Amino acid sequence: MKKIIFSLCLILYTTLAFADGKQDSILIIKADWATKTTAEGLTHKQAQIKGLFNSVQSINLIEIPRASKRKIGIAGNEGMKRTSLQATEKGAVAAINGTYYNMKEGNSVCFYKIGDTVIDTTTDGEFKSRVNGAIREKRGKIEIIEWSKPIEQSYKKSKGTVLASGPIMLDNGKRSDWSACSKSFIETRHPRSAIYTKGDGTVVFITVDGRSAGNADGVSIPELAYLVKILGGYDAINLDGGGSTTLYAEGENGSGIVNHPSDNKKFDREGERHVVNALLFIRK
């Protein structure tokens, strides 16, 4: 009898979990996405979705098609600057904040290599808590790759740029394993930034705002991975989040900021934080 009751409970739990996922999928797909396509070929989408993950989520994303005549770059090693400033200085049409860094020292705590020059290396703490991937850029194209301490120590490629981050959220369309990451970091809701690719080669920068009750509750890593998957993500990696989360689109809202950076603890576009690196869409 106990085995029968346990089996019935398991079936019920699985059914409810599937139902919740299905409802979230519907909310994402049928959301009132405000969409704007610029002359530069970028597509900016934004939505505030009430009820998603039993919360309120404020989402912004910028898509760039594979055929677009521009390149993706990684800016950094020039001190701590706002993402929007790094974008304007490099002539970028869009940008998102980069990876984790030491706010006191002003350096990345993740591997950062330009050509044959190593700028920063990944700390043991980052490897233990969340860094298991990297963004590799070569000739303006990017790919999301696995990363670890042994890979970093033996990495010899001298072309392109590599910036470590994590955790990887999707790998070939499948949800990644986060069992080796910090449980608190994975499960706690925060403002989040990420980059993902679609099957057709489209690259997407996405931010989910947080720390503003009633406006933006933030997401956990599993929730962000689910959102990206429903939006067509194939490979995806998490970037620095929290007060660093910033998405920039040239010419938008005066400052170019399209999300609601939380460093000033207000739900506006004034709370942008200084960061040490950023990912950019740059005119060729």
Image: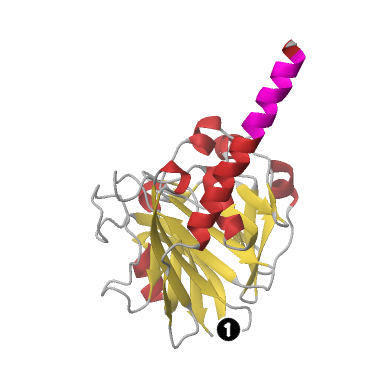
| Residue 23 image point, x, y percent | 53, 49
The residue depicted at 73 percent of the width and 57 percent of the height is 172
Residue displayed at 48% across by 63% down: 30
Q: Is residue 109 above or below residue 2?
A: below
Q: Main secondary structure of the magenta part?
A: helix
Residue at mark 1: 68
Residue 2 lies left or right of residue 240; in this view the side is right
Residue pushed farthest bottom? 39
| Screen quadrant of the C terminus | bottom right
> Residue 269, image x and y in percent?
27, 61
At which x and y percent is residue 136?
Answer: 65, 63
- Left or right of 75 in this view: 161: right
Q: Is residue 165 visible?
A: no
Q: Nearer the viewer, residue 88 or 205?
A: 205
- For this orientation, the residue located farthest to the top is 1
Q: Amino acid at mark 1?
A: Ser
Q: Nearer the viewer, residue 258 or 154?
A: 258
In percent of the image, x 71 and y 47: which residue is there? 153
Q: Which residues are magenta?
A: 3-14
- Is 65 drawn above or below residue 52 in the view shown? below
Dividing the image into 4 quarters, which one contains the N terminus?
top right
Choose top left, top right, bottom left or bottom right for residue 148: top right
Q: Is residue 224 magenta?
A: no
Question: From what the image shows, is residue 180 above or below residue 34?
Answer: above
Q: Is residue 130 visible?
A: yes
Q: Quadrant of residue 253?
A: bottom left
Callout 1 crowding tier (Cα within 10 Å): few <14, some 14–19, many ≥20: few
